[in-house]
């Protein structure tokens, strides 16, 4: 029997690898091979060669050269979406192995629906980081429930903190409730009372949010149930900004109570009757130790509790 000659496959002939995926994702982020190579501490010629190898193996062009830099092609964008999922899965696998050895490390991607969990999430994350200093956490706000649900189903998110709605997965973990409050200008007559009725706001303009986001949807539905239509004074992208602009007299703002900056708490009042929204945490389908630890910390936070959520339509009775 003849001996089989062993042959080492050179790097340029190796099949597609997660490292190549990471290179492509970095190039897409920076729009430049040079900048991507600097970030990953890789020689620029080596990264360029690996991107060419990847395109050759795929049989497509991933990036187009433009005056502003390298831009993903249509095919490239489709590939990069799946490459990101693959890279994150590999990092999770590594983190799970490290956690099994008693070292909670790796990357945790968290998204929070704009306006909710403003005090609770950072406190829970701070506690998590104290117990796991090697854990890298990325947090971003997302106003749209639809986009949050899409990102979760794609496996991009490890944990999403959001208000419960029709699109919320059935296995979501309830945390508590957030009460909506109305922010008003300094000296507004309605601040003299303990609560605000919607009909008393009939002539108020409103500081509003992105039309596709949950917060603007709550305002529209709440006013519609009371037979009112919102007059737009301005649109903003942050709940805290809406409160500050309302304080300056631009218009009223309807926001979750947890999103109110502490120095503006005297300028908000709850609605009468009260308007609450249940807040839940949604974990990825195969949660690892890091997201499970964060969920446990979120459950320990002080969340307003309520036996039954008051439907928005009930506010119309005020």
Image (cartoon, helix red, strand yellow):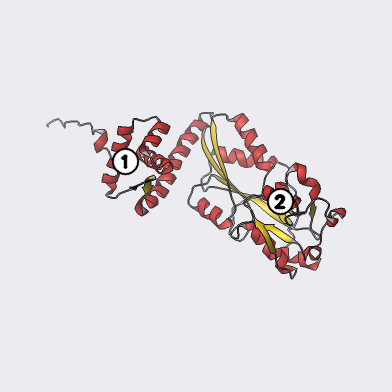
Is 316 located above or below residue 294 in the figure? below
Is 209 located above or below residue 135 in the figure? below
What is the quadrant of the N terminus in the image? top left
| Label 1 CA crowd tier, 10 Å (few <14, some 14–19, many 20+) | many
Mark number, residue 245: 2
Mark number, residue 265: none
Residue in the foreground of this view, choosing between 69 and 102? 69
Furthest-bottom residue in view?
227
Give the CA separation, mark 2 to mark 1.
48 Å
Q: Residue at x 41, y 39 (%)?
A: 26
Q: Quadrant of residue 140?
A: top right
Pinpoint residue 112: horizontal percent, then vertical percent. Answer: 60, 47
Pinpoint residue 291: horizontal percent, then vertical percent. Answer: 57, 41
Pinpoint residue 35: horizontal percent, then vertical percent. Answer: 40, 35
Mark in front: 2 vs 1: 2
Left or right: 32 with respect to 234?
left
Q: Secondary structure at mark 1?
A: helix
Callouts 2 and 1 close, C-beta under 8 Å: no
Left or right: 172 with respect to 80?
right
Residue in the foreground of this view, choosing between 74 and 82? 74
Residue in the foreground of this view, choosing between 98 and 2? 98
User: What residue is disc 1 on?
Assistant: 51
């Amino acid at each position: 029997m003849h001996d089989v000659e062993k042959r080492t496959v050179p790097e340029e002939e190796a099949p597609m690898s997660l490292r190549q995926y990471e290179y492509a994702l970095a190039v897409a982020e920076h729009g430049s091979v040079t900048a991507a190579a600097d970030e990953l501490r890789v020689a620029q010629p080596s990264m360029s060669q690996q991107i060419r190898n990847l395109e050759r193996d795929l049989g497509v062009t991933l990036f187009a050269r433009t005056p502003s830099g390298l831009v993903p092609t249509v095919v490239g964008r489709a590939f990069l979406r799946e490459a990101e999922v693959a890279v994150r899965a590999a990092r999770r696998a590594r983190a799970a192995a490290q956690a099994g050895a008693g070292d909670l490390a790796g990357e945790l991607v968290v998204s929070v629906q704009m306006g909710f969990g403003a005090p609770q999430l950072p406190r829970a994350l701070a506690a998590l980081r104290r117990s796991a200093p090697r854990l890298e956490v990325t947090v971003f706000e997302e106003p749209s429930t639809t986009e949050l649900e899409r990102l979760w189903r794609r496996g991009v998110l490890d944990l999403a903190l959001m208000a419960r709605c029709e699109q919320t997965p059935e296995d979501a973990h309830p945390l508590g409730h957030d009460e909506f409050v109305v922010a008003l200008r300094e000296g507004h007559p309605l601040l003299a009372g303990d609560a605000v009725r919607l009909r008393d706001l009939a002539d108020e303009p409103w500081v509003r949010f992105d039309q596709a986001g949950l917060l603007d949807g709550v305002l529209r539905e709440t006013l519609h149930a009371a037979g009112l239509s919102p007059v737009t004074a301005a649109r903003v992208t942050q709940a805290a900004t809406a409160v500050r602009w309302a304080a300056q007299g631009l218009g009223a703002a309807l926001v979750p109570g947890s999103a109110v900056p502490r120095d503006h708490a005297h300028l908000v009042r709850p609605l009468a009757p009260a308007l609450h929204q249940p807040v839940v945490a949604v974990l990825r389908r195969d949660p690892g130790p890091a997201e499970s630890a964060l969920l446990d910390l979120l459950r320990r936070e002080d969340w307003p509790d309520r036996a039954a959520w008051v439907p928005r339509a009930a506010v119309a009775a005020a």
